[in-house]
Amino acid sequence: MTTPTPALPTLPELRIQIDAIDQQLLTLLNSRALVAEKVGDVKKREGTAFFRPDRVAQVIEKIQLTNPGPLKGPHVAAIWREIMSACLALEAPQRVAVLGPAGTFCEQAAIEFFGGAADLIYCANFDEVFHATAAGSAQYGVVGVENSTEGMVTRSLDLFLHTPTHVIGEVTLLIRHNLLRLENSVEGIEAVLAHPLALAQCQAWLSKHLPHAERRPVSSNAEGARLATTNPAWAGLASERAATQFGLHIAAHAIQDEAYNRTRFAIICLPQTVETPPPTGRDCTSLIVSVPNRPGAVHDLLVPLKTHGVSMTRFESRPARTGQWEYYFYIDVQGHPSQPHVAAALADLQKLSAFYKLLGSYPVAE
């Protein structure tokens, strides 16, 4: 006699199960939020920082390590980042300055680092982001520093030199530029409006498909998308997020010339807001130096790194604007100043430098 096969649950039955689990999750999340509020009270009494990027990273890593599945690790990380962001907003909303308007990649980087509950302050350019962060109207700022196609964002480098902010983290985004406009077509476009870097990253596609369209630089890609809503003959280069934000069609998807186009964003704040994060074993240290204008000075600058076995991952120069052909050098090295060989190399390098500024030590973005 055969055993009858048990009936599979029906869709309505499964939905009832999901609804019940959702209620359990909501109860647990609110319990977590109540504890987070108590944590906030303790931090207020002690005067300690509300946002600790190293603590966020530790919690997420621990959750990922204990995750039994079937949820994937990156999805678990995204969920927990939003949970922690929402709880932190109950303790003290975090004000974060970003390049605006809404829909920029800078905004996306901020949400990826701080979560969706952060209080975003939209700025017209990176100068305003640095100023808002240095002046305290924002606790943190997010600025672009490097693109895999076009290189360094030189304005950010110059602003690092003259502001008291330091770097506590970074986010790397895969950049996809889409052609956005009111019409779902590439016909009749007279002008393409975007940030100069985006126009440069899409120049081959634009030359081939829109050779007669004016390329008009604006303060941000999202601003280009916003302006595209005002004229059917204009198009912007921006993210899918911006298309949704401004109600535009994506007339052409992913038109950047390089498929693997990434931009690196730095998270900045005043040292009194958050101190240098502790070492993680996957850290980067950024600094600015200058040396006297004499033969062999730049070579001598690099000797301490070789002597102490410290790997340099970036070396950029910017003119000092003194009229004497002098330069500031922007250097990234692997490691953290708490490591003896890194500390020794930095100490020797500082002795050789006419100017020395440590921009920050922070975990490397994956």
Image: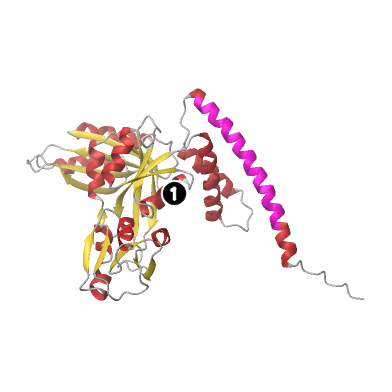
Residue 278, quarter of picture: top left
Instruction: Give the residue drawn at x 75%, y 63%.
Output: 13
**Stretch of the chain drawn in magenta:** 18-44
Q: Is residue 219 visible?
A: yes
Kind of residue at disc 1: Ile
Under tag 1, what secondary structure? helix
Instruction: Give the residue drawn at x 45%, y 41%.
Output: 280
Taking the magenta stretch, the answer to whether it contains residue 97 is no
Which residue in the protein does label 1 denote?
111
Quarter in which the N terminus is drawn: bottom right
- Give the number of marks: 1
Q: Nearer the viewer, residue 188 or 253?
A: 188
Describe residue 186's horizontal placement relative to residue 301 as left or right.
Answer: right
Instruction: Give the residue drawn at x 25%, y 73%.
Output: 210
**Residue 203 percent coordinates (x, y):** 24, 67
**Residue 205 percent coordinates (x, y):** 28, 71
- Whether 150 is drawn above or below 329: the answer is below
Identity of the residue furthest to the right in this view = 1
- Whether 220 is drawn above or below 319: the answer is below
By what rule are the colours in the image chosen?
Answer: secondary structure
- Whether 148 is drawn above or below 352: the answer is below
Instruction: Give the residue drawn at x 57%, y 33%.
Output: 37
Q: Nearer the viewer, residue 53 or 216?
A: 216
Describe residue 317's horizontal placement relative to residue 137 as left or right.
Answer: left
**Residue 34 percent coordinates (x, y):** 61, 35
Dominant SS type (magenta): helix
Residue 336, quarter of picture: top left
